[in-house]
Amino acid sequence: MPFMPVKFNLQKRVKLAQGLWMLYWLSVIVGILIFSLGIFFKIELRKRSEMMDNNESHLVPNLLILVGVLACGVNAFGGKVCHDSLDPIKFAKWKPMLKPYLLLCCGFNVLLLLTALLCFLMQFAMYLTLAEGLKNGIKFYKDTDTPGRCFMKRTLDMTQIEFRCCGNNNFRDWFEVQWISNRYLDMSNDEVKDRVLSNVEGKYLMDSVPFSCCNPGSPRPCLQHHLTNNSAHYDYDHRTEELNIWTRGCREALFSYYSSMMNSIGALVIATIFLESVDMAGLKYLSTALEMMSDPENPECESEGWLLEKGVKETFTELLAKLKMLGKTNQVEEGGEAATAAT
């Protein structure tokens, strides 16, 4: 007994073929979109590679690019089959390829599922990479003369301005590092000298932040120096007043940006899996309905299409039996090879 049989006449077969043709080309458009998002995601990772210490993973964008290309090819082929399905002569040449094609579609859906899972699971690795990269970026902010770190200051400043953030966790991260190069410090100045000598590691630390932390929306001119010294500014209390610098950390801001992108892409890939499943089911109905026509020369005759030739239980049992048989065949072949080697 076939699983989920449906009766088809000529009109229903034509409507099914036309609907499937449209769905397959919609899937091609979705494939182009996934490919484009993969390229965009890869570019966004490259743009802020320094913020991740050049350790960012490109597995997800590379998979998206691959999946996008495969989606275009697989669905364009399916669209062509549906277009030719109502012409018996043209459909005859596609008929032997349908079973391998449907198996390929099943494998493609597994790849799509893996890609969607990675879009969600790789976010934790992204968070850790951002945390370490930003920590090192703040540490190397002052090294504008060091090869390989010349543009770190510019990159970090532009990141803080674009994402409206300051520091790694918050603005206080800048208090823990020397972010002004020694070449711009007057070591003959007693105040500078005392500050350097008072630090165990010989660093010039201060309760200040770079200009890029300033919030231009604040009505008060930016206070970026002596942030914890109330007496240094008029009518100011750092414990109660809302500071006119960004209080959000860049790790949170960047992670929010990338995670929202990965969540959106993951949702699109999951929707693509459902679309591909509908395409597969429709093509299976169409192919079986065309094969089961009682009089292939009479297009007006009725036919029956189904998803599975037998019930789900029978199909599953038959599949297990084939897998067991394949395993036994491999064991026999290995035993024969071992016996041949022994003689």
Image: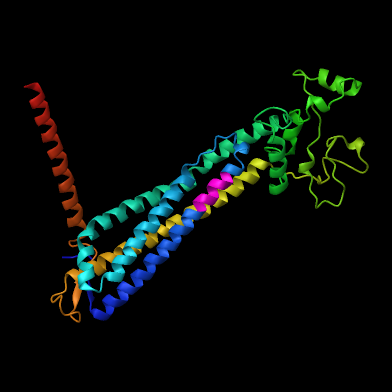
Image quadrant where residue 22 sits: bottom left
Q: Position of residue 251 (x, y in %)?
A: 64, 41
Q: Quadrant of the C terminus?
A: top left
Residue at (93% x, 42% y) in the render: 234
Residue stretch rendered in magenta on the structure: 37-45
Q: Nearer the viewer, residue 17 or 307?
A: 17
Task: Tell whether 333 sits left or right of 184.
Answer: left
Left or right? Give the position of 114 relative to 103: right
Residue 339, position as x, y percentages in the image: 8, 26
For image coordinates 32% across by 63% down, the residue present is 78
The quadrant of the picture occupied by the N terminus is: bottom left
| Badge count | 0
Q: Nearer the viewer, residue 292 or 309?
A: 292
**View extreme (left): residue:** 343
- 83 vs 191, left or right, is left
Is residue 282 at least partly visible in the picture? Answer: no
Residue at 91% from the left image edge and 20% from the top image edge: 190
Residue 232 vertical placement versus 311 (above, below): above
